[in-house]
Amino acid sequence: MIYLIGGSSHVGKTLLAQKLLERTGYPYLSLDHLKMGFIRTGMTDLTVEDDREMRYWMWPFVAEIIKTAVENGQNMIIEGCYIPSEWKDSFSEEYLAHIRSLFIVMTESYLRSHAADLEDYANVIEKRLEDRIDIERLIACSEEFRKECGEQGIPCYVIDEAFCLEDMLAAVLATE
């Protein structure tokens, strides 16, 4: 099985991927790592600030990684904000039978009332370098992902009142 965990920045995608790895034993790929590989090798002129452009530039590579894993009967977790909401368009039904997704977003009220928590937990799995939280950007990104998920029929887990990792884990496993 391939699990895709998408959504906006700072919502807990990497933490959820780590917990899913611990539960299933499936390896995970952080698309942030892949992005940095492309940037640091000069394979793209995009920068860490070009999230939307990077999503669509990088996705063809990710889709081919997924196809290869499916063809080889391998399991994998892929997480990052670089999974487009229309990801299904990259696969035939044969591949889609092996892929599950969950996008995570936070409501504006949650983001505004938990800004300090976002900063406190930003480095719980990864060590983010000079990562400043821009609440207005996070609100806009979460709302965009939420809207796109509705349009694409993609499962979306909305964090509104409380951040509950066990509920998120149950939601991603329920996509099977």
Image (tube, rainbow, N blue to C red):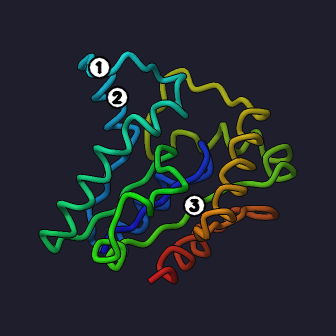
Residue 165 tag number: none
Q: Is residue 128 above or below residue 93?
A: above
- State which quadrant residue 97 falls in: bottom left
Q: Is residue 12 left or right of residue 63?
A: right
Q: Earlier in the sequence, mark 3 or mark 2?
A: 2
> Could you give the CA–CA distance between mark 3 and mark 1, rounded to whole angstroms?
27 Å
Which element carries disc 3, helix, strand or loop?
strand
Q: Position of residue 16 (x, y in %)?
A: 49, 61
Helix, strand or loop for disc 2:
helix
C-alpha gap between disc 2 and disc 1: 6 Å
Residue designated by label 3: 103
Where is residue 120 shown, x and y percent of the image?
A: 64, 40
- Residue 39 x/y as whole percent: 33, 22
When the figure is inspected, residue 4 is found, relative to residue 170, above or below; the finding is above
**Up-down relation of residue 5 to residue 42 (above or below):** below
- At 43% from the left and 20% from the top, the residue drawn is 46
What amino acid does circle 3 point to? Phe
State which quadrant residue 166 falls in: bottom right
Residue 5 higher or lower than 46, as above or below: below
- Return the residue at label 2: 36
Q: Residue at x 47, y 79 (%)?
A: 173
Which residue position holds label 1? 40
Left or right of 170 in this view: 19: left
| Crowd band around label 1 with a 10 angstrom C-alpha radius: few (<14), some (14–19), many (20+) | few
